[in-house]
Structures are given as C-alpha cells and as structure tokens.
Image (cartoon, rainbow, N blue to C red):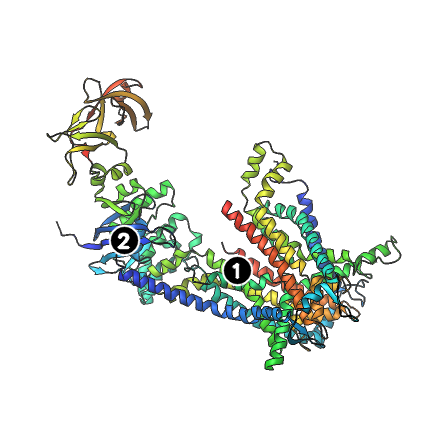
Amino acid sequence: MKAKKAAIEARGVSRVFAAKGQQAVAALDDVSVTINENEFFTLLGPSGCGKTTLLRLIAGFDFPTSGQILLYGEDIAVLPPFKRPVNTVFQNYALFPHMTVAQNIGFGLEMLGKPRTEIDARVSEMLALVRMEELASRKTSQISGGQQQRVALARALAPKPKVLLLDEPLSALDYKLRKDMQIELKRLQHETGITFIFVTHDQEEALTMSDRIAVMSKGKILQVGSPHDIYDRPAVRFVANFIGETNFLKGIVRPSGKVKLAAGAEIEAVAPEGAKLSGEVTVVIRPEHALLVKPTQGKLKGVVDNIVYFGTDTHFHVLLDDGSEFMVRQQNSGGAAADFAKGDKVGVQIAAGTARILKD
Amino acid sequence: MMAELNPAAQIAEAAQQVASKRNRLLSTPALVMITLFGIGPLILILIYSFLKAAPYGGVEWKFSTDAYLNFLFQRDIFDDTLQFSPDYLYIYARSIGFALITTIVCLFIGFPTAYFMATREPAQRNWWVLLITIPFWSNLLVRTLAIMFIIRDEGLINHILIWAHVIDKPITMLYTNGAILIGLLYSYLPFMILPLYSSIEKMDFRLVEAGHDLYANKRQVLWRVIIPLAKPGIIAGCLLVFIPAIGAYVTPLILGGGTHLLIGDLIAQQFGSGRNWPLGSAQALILMAAVLVALFFYVRNTTGKMTHG
Amino acid sequence: MVDVKAQPGFKTMALICLVLLYSPILILIVFAFNSGDIIMRWEGVSLHWFGVAFTNPEFQNAAWNTLRISAVATIASTLFATLAAIGMTRIKPWPGMKTAFMVINLPLMVPEIITAVATLSFFALLAQVLGLNFGIGNIMLAHIVFCIPFAFMPIRARLEDMDLTLENAAADLYATPWNAFKRITLPLLVPGIASGAALAFIVSFDDFTITQLVAGPGQTTLPLYIWDQTRRPMTPEINAISAILLLVSVLFITISFLIARSRK
C-alpha cells in the first residue's frame, strides 16, 4: 500500500473565545489530527462541539489561540483566507446574488488572475461536472436549493483547491435530495481526487460517505477511525452513545479477563488499547449483536418490557434481572422474533466478540 | 495553564485593530460635519441663552440669566421689579396640549388603518405602504397649503356651502385653533401609521386564532391580544407624532396666521431682526428638554421591553 | 370564508384615512389646471399656470437654487453616510461607536425649528466674528448635516441585512479585502446607497424651516418662493408650483420605495 501523505495536520490547536466579563470558552481544546491526501474526512459531533471552529481555522476565517495548522507540511495558521489554497462550501452556500451561475463559478479563478480563456474553459468543465450546463447564465436566485448546492460545489472546486472544506452543506436540503447529493459528493470526490473535509452532525451521513471520521465533543476529538471502527469499536461512552444505539452494562473485570456483569452473566469482552483491565468497567453491546432466546439458553435473563415495531426490524426492550434495561434489535425475517410477547421471560444471547469494554 | 498567544492569533488581533482604526476613520467625515455644523450651533444657543440681548438683534457678550427669567417673568418698566407673566408658559402648555390631542387622534385613526394594511395580501400591502409613504415624505409646506386652500374664506368648503345656499357668508375657519389642529393631524398622521404598521405586520396572526380558539370575541382579541402585541409600534408612533408636533413651525405659521402661536413660531419670532436672541435660545432649549423627556420615556420603555422579552 | 383577522370598522377607517391624506393634495393639484385667474373659480382645464410659472424668472431662479442646493446636499450627505455606515457595521464595535451612532442620528432627534435657529445663530456668528459667509453654501452646509441620517438609515439597513458569509466566501475564493469590497460588498450596497440618496434629495428639496431661517437675501428656494407667493394675492400659479414640487417628491419617494422593496 502506498504511504499516505498528510494534507492537513492540526497540532495542539486551541481556540479560546474570551468575552469581556465572561469566562473564557475553549471552542477547541488542544486538538491534534492528521487528514490524509485524497481522503473523505468527516468531523462529526453535536452542535457546539468545535467542528465548525476547526473548519474555520483551516479556511482562515479564524485564527488559533495556540497550536499549528499545517497544509502539506507548511504552517498556514498566519495566512489570511485569500492566500490559502483551500476552498469552502458554505452551509447556506453564500452564492453571490448579483452574479450568474457562471460568474460565481469563475470568481475564484478571476481573483487568481487567470486569463479569460482559461477561466471560461474551467467554468464549462465545472458546469459539466455538476451537470448544470443549461443554467450557466441564470442568476443564483433563480435556481432551486439543490442546484444552488451544485453551484456552490462547482465554485469551490473550480480553482482546484488542495483541500475542499464542506460546512454541513446538505443540512438545508430535504431528505430525498440529501440522499442524492450524498452520492453526488462521493462521486465528485472520487473524480477530482481532492481531499474533502466534511462537517456534519448527522451520523448516518458521516457513516455512509466518509473514509475516516473524527467524532468531536466539547472542543476535543474523542476518536478517529473508519466508519467501521467508529461504529463497531467505539472507544468511549460518548462515541458509542452518539452513533447508533447501544446498551451500556456495568461490570467488573475478573482476573481471567472476562467481565462479570452486574446483571449476572460473565462474558468475554474485547478491550481497546488503553482501556483499564481491572475493577469496574462499562461494556457496550449493540442491540443487533444480541439475540432473544428462551430463558434457559441465554446468559442474561429478563422480562420483555416493551416491543417497538420498525418495519424492517423490531426493538425489544428487556428489563434485566438487576433492573437495568437492555435493547435487542431483531430483523423481521418472519422468524422467531414474533414468538415473544410483552411480559415473557426471556434470555439474551450475545454474539461472540461483539461486547467491548470502554475506556471511560 | 494560559497558553502563550500564537503568532497567528497575534497577527489576527493586529489586523482587527487596523480594521477598527480604518472604520473609525471612515466615520470621521460624517461625524466632523455633524459636530461642526449640527452640535456646534446647539452649543452656541446654549451659550446665547446665558447672554444679554443686544438692542438690535444678536447678543452682547455679558453673562445674564435674563432669558430664563423672561420666560416666566416680565420686568416692570417703571420700578424694575419682576412680575410673574404666564404668557410663554401658556404657549408651551398649548403646544403640548395640541401635540397630545394630535397624537391621540392620529392613534385613533392610524391604528385601524395600520391594522387593516397589515392584514392585506402581501402584494396589496406594498401598495398601501407606498400610499402612506408618499405623504410621509411629501413636502410639508405644500400639504399645509393644501389644507389652507380648502378652509380659507374663499376656499373650497365655503365656496361649496355658499353655492349650495347653506350659508350666505363664509365661515371663518383659517387662523383658528381648529385649523392648527387639523393641520397637525394631517401633517403627522403618516408618522403614526408607518411604525404601527411595521410592528403589526411582524405579529404572528396565529395568536389571533389562538385567542378566538380560547373563546375571546373580536373585541376581546383586539384589546387582550392585538393591542398589547402592537405596543412597541404604538409607543414609536406616538413619539414620532408627538415630537415633531410639539415643535411644529410650518403648521401654526400658515394655518395659525401668527396669531395663535405655538412654540415653533414663538421661537422663530425671537430670531427676527430686532428681537431677543437669548430669549429665543432659552425657549429652544426648554423645548429640547421637553423632547428629551419624551425620548427618555421612550428609551426606558423599549429597553424595559427587551429585558422582559 | 370569514376572515378571523378582520376587525369591524377598520376597513372604513382605513379608507377614510386615505381620503383624508389625499383629498387636499389632489384638490390642490386639480386647481393647478384651472385656466381662470381665481383659484377656486373653475374656468376650464389649461396648462396656462404651469407656463406662467416656468417663464417667471423668480421661479426659475428659485428652481436653480433649489437644484444646486439639493444636488450638493445629496451627493455630500450620501458620500459621508456611506462611509460612516461601512465604518459602523459588522465590525467589532470600536470605542465610542455608540456615541458616534447617536451623533449621526442627532439631526433626527432635534426639532427642526431648533436646528434652524441654532444654525442661523451659528452662521451669523461666523459672519460677524470671522467675516465668513459662504452665501448659498451656508444653506448647503445646513442641508448636508440634516440629510446625513436620512441617507445613513437605508445604507446601514442594507449592510446589516447583507450576508456576512458572502465576504468570507469571496476571501475564500482568493479575493483580497479590497477586491471583496469592490466586487461583492459595493455592488450589493448600491440599492441602499440609491435609496439613501433619494431620501436625502427629497429631504433637502422639500426643506422649508431651516432654509427659511438660514437663507440670506436672494437665496430663495422653491419652498421659500411658494411661501412668498402666499403672502401676495394668490393665483393658480402657486398651485402649479406646488404640484411640481409634489410630483418631484412622489417621483423620488417611489424610486426609493421600489429600490428598498426589490431587496428580496
């Protein structure tokens, strides 16, 4: 495999907002992360987690209080935005309302002082890329939201930036259009080969589109990894909780390495690097990794408390013997699931190798 | 630990300071103009109000509180004693009274109008706003003259009445208190409607439906829902009418004919040649004080609103 | 369908209000087209009195003065207001900005008659102590000052409405701050500037109070000329001139209004 080249590297970046008479707030707290060339990298987290601040620091709209931001090894933290070979797709698109679609797309190249013929050629190329050829001479107020989105993308891609920053670009679109644009974005990234840094609070969007995801909370990056890593191997409680649905079980690590759960059973659990392997721990089990069985067969035992039907699958809320709640998701393939009713005594089986110990 | 400021952050800070300085510089021409030719003259009349009047207009540069004393007292020509004279006070009271009546009547006519405008379809609304905006900005002198043409002895009303044999002699309407009141009302009605409209237009009309849903009838919805919500607009409108009405100059000049004085033309008279400039300055400052009281009331009311909201 | 929002009698009041506001002006204008010598005695439609007004050298002189004063006041106040609005919007507030804002709006708060007598005293003092008299320039200076806030309001409103990310987007696309201003901010600001200039023009063109007190002999403007006419035996010429003034106001108001409306 080819060695990966770092496109963006943040080193110990902090951004502290200090308002007069108020306590200083760290929007970013000592964040370090490396984003590789050609990667679709997503910053995922709830609003206020610092993901947009990090994006603004990379774009140059804001400056770090401390730390370095490197673009291909060169510190760009002191450069104003118009000197950074980085372009942004804004959340509200920020298309220039007094210009046509083509003028918008050509603006960056024009500002770089490119000759007219080159600009025109590149604009046509971009229009074709986002399939907007017929609308080139429209005013941006005369096109739909989805089309504005494409123009914003074309405008940001036209100057061939080294990195493309996307600030929740799909949040203003309705569900169907958003799904289409997700595929479109992947295609564009693939065709242009440009590094995409994508900011979103939508876990599904992050999981389907990204090569790697950084999950952020309260100004810190909690975990970086592939969608698989993040979903199947969450390192900390916040990540497990924020992405997908999860059962958290308390337990104690036995000298054997197994975990004795408070709910009774003793199970095998995988521990990530850096997790403590003694004393009280939290174990996570995804609902789809558990199976409802007869009370005699399962390691964990409880009573079905509630059943919620979702079409493709059904959620069983089981009250375990120690009083904690445990959710099991079963696909509706017309099998055993239907056999359990509210109030039934059941056992819960856990697929081997799926239970994980959290770091915190 | 407080981290050492980044070079980047330092540069950003410096850039911000440069921008701040540049922006201050951009505002300078306007500020200099207004300070020199707007605030300077105001300070000058403040000084003038404490000087002695020169016999043929203008001032003598000697300190004196005569202007303020003259406002309330008259100096007896024979024994040089001060005697209370309420003439000016009476004019001020009359002006304030006229301004109040104007404000109330404008509100009474303006509120239904503004509400009606705000409940039209958007396209129709624009036309209404333009129709009210035109008199708002139109020449006040010409609009006042238009009233004069209608109500003077040889004016339209008398003409029609005589023609119809209702009367055989013209009724005197010009140069009366009534004429001034009609003129003030006519002049400042648009000043009431536009702020009222903009506050009613922003209103969430689902609240009206909610009011009806909770068994309120139209009148109750009006008094318990609509009017309380329109309060900022009502206050702004009343102020926009009251402040210019209290200092009105053109209206009493043309419709009062110099006999029914209001503050505005009283002040102007003092600045004619051979008149008493310091007294006029003092009178202007007393008017300014009345306006400031009204503005203070407004600011207190609106900022109070914000902290509540 | 019943309109839940409607209130009884409000429509009638609105219509009365329109009649109240418009009938005097319309009557005034109608009689400008009277061919007779006496205003209220209708003798047929004619443009006679417009002709009389236009050929009257006094009217011509007043119109020329008015146009000169309004042109200078409009250009200068719009320029100052534009600079100030740019300097006072969307930037970290600089120290004293609140005060500066109040200073700009001061001419709106002070009753016009006070401004008029204060300005009169000021120019009288300048002439007396320094021997300075700018002639018609005195009126221009006074007009510039009180036109600034009128021009300032729509320009500032436009700037505040403007999407800040547009300038960020320009910077992101390699536009230097000056280029971003020239290519993005300024073109988007033009309607606000035009609207402000139109308002400044109306306010200056129509001003009577301040001009009357500040004007020296021979510095008659159109409103002053009309006022002088009312003190002589009146002919429909005064209606004709009033109609012209109203027409100019309506024209500029409508322009300003339409520009402001076209924002979205």
Residue B207 as seen in the image, left or right of residue B273 = left
Q: Residues within 10 Å of mark 2 (few under 14, many from 20)?
A: many
Quadrant location of residue C52?
bottom right
Q: Looking at the picture, tell me which residue is in the foreground, B184 or C34.
A: B184
Q: Residue at x 38, y 48 (%)?
A: A146
Quadrant location of residue C94?
bottom left
Q: Chain of mark 1?
A: C
Tell me, for residue A327, which label it has, or none: none
Residue B181 as seen in the image, left or right of residue C88 = right
> In this rendering, does residue C219 appear at all?
yes
> In this rendering, does residue A194 appear at all?
no
Q: Looking at the picture, tell me which residue is in the foreground, A103 or A15.
A: A15
Q: Chain of mark 2?
A: A
Residue that badge 1 annotates: C154
The residue type indicated by label 1 comes to: Pro
Residue C90 place in picture, x, y as percent: 43, 59
Up-down: is C133 above or below A70? Answer: below
Residue C55 place in picture, x, y as percent: 71, 75
Q: Residue at x 57, y 43 (%)?
A: B229
Q: Residue at x 28, y 43 (%)?
A: A206
Q: Secondary structure at mark 1?
A: helix
Up-down: is B214 above or below A100? Answer: above
The residue type indicated by label 2 comes to: Ser
Q: CA distance from mark 2 to mark 1?
A: 40 Å
Residue that badge 2 annotates: A14
Q: Secondary structure at mark 2?
A: strand
Residue C129 place in picture, x, y as percent: 60, 80
Residue A249 place in picture, x, y as percent: 23, 30
